[in-house]
Each structure stands twice: as C-alpha cells, then as structure tokens.
Amino acid sequence: MSEKSGIVFVGSKMPMDYVLAIITGLSASNAKEITLKARGQAITTAVDAAEITRNRFLKDLKVSKIAIGTEEMPPREGETRSRMVSTIEIKLTRE
Amino acid sequence: MSEKSGIVFVGSKMPMDYVLAIITGLSASNAKEITLKARGQAITTAVDAAEITRNRFLKDLKVSKIAIGTEEMPPREGETRSRMVSTIEIKLTRE
C-alpha cells in the first residue's frame, strides 16, 4: 500500500488498511481527491475500501470516476504466455 | 447466470461463461445495451467478463456507466449480524 500524489495502490491486505490509507492521504495533504488503483482479485478490495470510507468515515466523499481496463502481465515462472489482468481505477473526490 | 431485460447477474462461474451471456444477450434481443451486476468477490469476475468481451469479441462495445454500492445481506446461519457487501454495475453499450 503506497501513496504517491493522491494514488493508493490496492493489493492483498484487508480493506480497512486501504480505508486508513485513503483517510490519511486525504487529510495529510488536504487534497480534494484520491485515486484507488487495483488489479485482479484486489479489484473487490478496492470497491470495498471505497464503499467503507464513504459510508462510515467520510460521508462527503463522492465517487467521481470509475474506469476499468486490461494490463498485460509478464508470464509467471515456468509459463511462457503473458497474462491479461483486469484493472480498476476509482477516483474519490471531496465536496 | 440469468438474463432479464438486459441484465446479466455475475456469480461464481468463470468469466467466459458471462462473456457468452453478454454476447447472446445482445444478439438475441438485438439490444443496444446490457448491464452486468455483481457483488462481493464476483466483482472481479464482472470486470474480467466486460474486458474480455470488449477486447476480444465485440470491439464496438463501450463501457457507458460504472456504479458501485453497498448492499445489506442477511446474517449467515449461526451469526447474528447482517453483513455489508459491495456491489458493482457495469453498463455496456453498443455504438
């Protein structure tokens, strides 16, 4: 979970870990928006984190944009074909 | 996987099963749009199905709307608290 210029990369931790990253990311920089990025199974975690943050903690946060896409990942060890992985970007904006 | 008036409910099957549902749903009714609905872990499957359909089969299909939300599910047997589950809706539109 890293934060760089308003981006939170969502991986395999619990949704609450990313909720915390969103909240601290927004308050530290006093930024108006933050973007969650995730791929593969972490897509569900990203949606969970966005929903928990909006419903429980920052009720003035709005989902301003959602985009989905596909990324090519290098083949795993022992495999020869690269894999296609779905991605999501969720932008949250403070009113 | 059921289809009702342009809606494909995405569950725990493989993404390709829903890709097929999207393609047949669009061609059978000659409809211009179809909406994928999923919750919990199936959110990733819904994104996969939308991306595979767009990239491999129906290249004129556009993602016209994505919405996320939260639904309250009744408690599991032996539990007393209801659970909150994230949801996604992906609307695909043919040009």
Image (spheres, coloured by chain):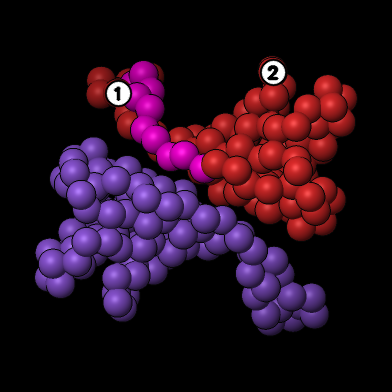
Chain colours: A purple, B red
Query: Where's residue A12, x and y in %?
Result: 42, 62
Q: In what element is the residue under mark 1?
A: loop
In the rendered image, residue B61, in percent from the top left (x then y), is placed at 74, 47
Left or right: where A43 falls relative to A10: right
- Left or right of A91? Residue A82 is right
Q: Is residue B42 visible?
A: no
- Distance between the Cα atoms at labels 1 and 2? 30 Å
Front residue of B65 and A70? B65
Q: Provide the chain ID for the residue under circle 2.
A: B
Determine if the magenta segment contains residue B47: no
The main secondary structure of the magenta stretch is strand
Q: What's under tag 2, amino acid-wise?
A: Ser
Q: Is residue A9 above or below residue B75?
A: below
For residue B68, say whether it is visible. Answer: yes
- The correct choice, above or below, for B79 with respect to A42 in the image is above
Judging by the rendered image, the residue that carries numbered circle 1 is B82
Range covered by the magenta-colored residues: B66-76
A42 lies left or right of B77: right
Q: Quadrant of residue A19?
A: bottom left
Say whether marks 1 and 2 touch (CB < 8 Å). no
Residue at image mark 2:
B5
The answer to which of marks 1 and 2 sits earlier in the sequence is: 2
